[in-house]
């Protein structure tokens, strides 16, 4: 997408208006990917807002969001297209029952029987879309190589139908949880963005924007506590921004206006999701961790 009328100020205001709180370290790579017409590769821990970037772009640009959720074992057919074998078989049975014999292969393998999966849908869409390729680090290297070729040319070859070229080049966002290294070829094709957990000030702003009933003081305490949990405790699973928002809403529903030992202990299951992490938090609280967590020491 190369829209000369869009500048960084417009994008900043659009993201803010949609409730995505970020600074220019995130906005600039997003902006450059749009202006250069290159895919955006977003890496970072789960829950830092990678997938949400594609959703926000879809909304602020007024484009359809097409999502390919990656997983181990995903292959080209599941991501690109499949033939509607049940409908083809029904067609054969109808023709045979009417005495017409078997249909020609070209009749059976036409676009009428083609089931478009996310990648082909994005290529064949009549209008531009946002293509989200989510958690690309879960696929194997062969599929990653296929993706690289697809994103280079935005065309695919279907043996029965020939080459299909994109009608409109989609806005492409790939996300990765950094579970494995991606190939240099795929990275070179993209504008790269790494998103870490936000600093407490920004996380407090996110909490206020997404949970508007939460007061400024409680939002600041939640953000400070989240920063402490992620950096000071050796947790198996660091709590995400989404869990911080859940925590804020839970505290609000319970009528808490500030954090203390009781409120943290009672609601810890909202942000920590395994026994070892809950035990680590309880030990820390018992040793006076609440004061350290909230910067009161």
Image: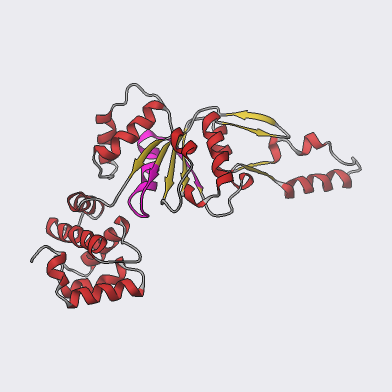
148 and 14: which is toward the camera: 148
Q: Outermost residue toward the left?
A: 297
Find residue 50 and report its horizontal and vertical position in percent.
Answer: 37, 47
| Magenta-colored stretch includes residue 50 | yes
In the image: residue 184, left or right of residue 165: left
Q: State the quadrant of the N terminus.
A: top left
* Magenta stretch bounds: 42-68
Q: Position of residue 103 (x, y in %)?
A: 84, 39
- Taking 50 as reference, is 268 above or below it? below
Q: Is residue 241 shown left or right of residue 98?
A: left
The quadrant where residue 81 appears: top right
Q: Residue at x 63, y 30 (%)?
A: 164
Which of these two is toward me, 81 or 187? 187
Name the residue: 17% across, 59% down. 224
Q: Nearer the viewer, residue 161 or 87?
A: 161
Residue 272 figure quarter: bottom left
Please say if 114 is above or below 205: above
Question: Depth check: 4 or 61 in front?
Answer: 4
| Coloring scheme used | secondary structure
Q: Locate the C terminus by quadrant.
A: bottom left
The residue located at (30%, 49%) in the rendering is 196
Residue 79 counted in the magenta span? no
Residue 76 drawn at (x, y percent): 61, 44
Q: Relative to residue 8, is residue 192 depicted above or below?
A: below
Say how many tags the image has: 0
Please tell me which residue is depicted at 61% across the width and 48% down the height of the picture. Answer: 75
């Amino acid at each position: 997408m190369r829209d000369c009328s869009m500048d960084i100020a417009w994008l900043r205001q659009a993201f803010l208006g949609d409730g995505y709180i970020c600074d220019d370290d995130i906005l600039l790579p997003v902006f450059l990917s749009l202006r250069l017409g290159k895919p955006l590769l977003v890496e970072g821990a789960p829950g830092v807002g990678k997938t949400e970037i594609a959703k926000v772009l879809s909304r602020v640009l007024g484009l359809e969001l097409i999502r390919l959720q990656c997983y181990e074992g995903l292959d080209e057919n599941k991501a690109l297209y499949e033939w509607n074998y049940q409908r083809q078989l029904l067609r054969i049975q109808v023709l045979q029952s009417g005495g017409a014999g078997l249909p020609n292969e070209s009749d059976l393998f036409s676009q009428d029987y083609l089931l478009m999966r996310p990648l082909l849908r994005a290529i064949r869409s009549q209008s531009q879309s946002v293509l989200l390729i989510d958690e690309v680090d879960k696929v194997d290297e062969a599929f990653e190589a296929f993706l690289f070729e697809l994103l280079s040319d935005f065309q695919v070859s279907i043996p029965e139908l020939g080459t299909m070229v994109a009608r409109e080049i989609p806005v492409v966002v790939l996300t990765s949880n950094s579970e494995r290294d991606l190939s240099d070829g795929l990275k070179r094709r993209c504008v790269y963005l790494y998103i870490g957990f936000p600093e407490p000030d920004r996380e407090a702003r996110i909490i206020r924007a997404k949970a508007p009933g939460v007061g400024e003081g409680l939002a600041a305490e939640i953000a400070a506590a989240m920063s402490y949990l992620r950096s000071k405790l050796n947790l198996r699973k660091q709590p995400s921004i989404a869990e911080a928002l859940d925590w804020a809403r839970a505290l609000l529903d319970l009528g808490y206006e500030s954090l203390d030992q009781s409120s943290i202990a009672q609601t810890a299951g909202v942000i920590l999701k395994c026994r070892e992490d809950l035990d680590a938090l309880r030990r820390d609280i018992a040793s006076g961790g609440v004061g350290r967590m909230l910067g009161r020491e």
